[in-house]
Amino acid sequence: MNEWFNLVDYTISEQIIFALGCALWFVVYAVTIYSLYKNKFCEIPAWVVCANISWEFLKSFIFLTDMGKFYNIAYAGWFFLDLYILYGAYRYGDKLVFTPAIKKYFKLILSFNFISWFAIIYFMMYLKYDDVVGALSAFVINIVISVLYNYVILNVDIKYLNNFSYTVAWTKMFGTAFVGIFAAIHWQGNYLLVSLGVIIFILDLCYTLLLYKKRRKNK
């Protein structure tokens, strides 16, 4: 059992809470991929897709978690799902770019963004600024995700509004919240992680409320 789930350094309740967070993020990816296929639309802002896939590659194949083999496989699953989302970001991500000058050079800027995120996350893990689970780097990425989702929903063209999923809004909010609860329990006294988790939850709640408000207004 400890090979698949580390029950020496992590309690059963911690494992369950963390696994719930991971499962909810799988739903985020599944719904995003369905929207890519059906609507030719990438709901996740392209800039953070690059951060996500960089984190997943590094945690799957280079800086492995000590929580158990299950999570290494789960992270690899996220990575392979995110390959399709990255393709979608390159193909359709410019629909969520609102500045003409950036839109013109979108793919070039996105490529630079990908290289930059990979380097930042790699050295953050290599130099051990991150924890073995990858929670700190993941929360830093999630701050950017949550800020961009709010920015996008406030500026998006009405014709794309229905492509934003209520399911994604709820599952990404509670998926990250469960990881935040895990972090608060496992690293008691780590106020950096706790504060990041609270900020992300507030931003995600704001996004969810904005999404409901804008979609009801434009029915």
Image (tube, rainbow, N blue to C red):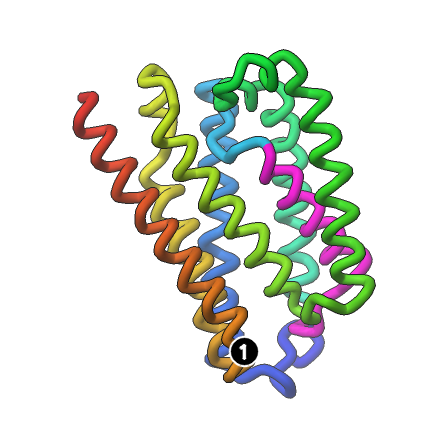
Q: Residues within 10 Å of mark 1 (few under 14, many from 20)?
A: few
Callout count: 1
Query: Mark 1 falls on what kind of element?
Result: loop
Residue 86, image x and y in percent?
Answer: 64, 32
Picture residue at 18% right of the left edge, 29% below the top: 216
Q: Of the residues shown, which amino acid type is indicated by label 1?
A: Asn
Please give the range of residues in magenta. Answer: 47-68
Look at the image and tell me whether residue 16 can be seen: no
Residue 2, image x and y in percent?
Answer: 67, 80
Q: Is residue 91 above or below residue 139?
A: above
Q: Find the residue positioned furthest to the bottom.
A: 8
Viewport quadrant of the N terminus: bottom right
| Residue pointed to by mark 1 | 190
* 140 left or right, relative to 69: left
In magenta stretch: residue 57: yes
Name the dominant secondary structure of the magenta segment: helix
Q: Is residue 57 above or below residue 13?
A: above
* 48 left or right, relative to 40: right
In magenta stretch: residue 184: no
Picture residue at 17% right of the left edge, 26% below the top: 217
Q: Is residue 140 above or below residue 37?
A: below
Residue 120, image x and y in percent?
Answer: 74, 50
Picture residue at 73% right of the left edge, 53% below the top: 121
Residue 46, image x and y in percent?
Answer: 58, 31
Picture residue at 71% right of the left edge, 44% below the top: 117
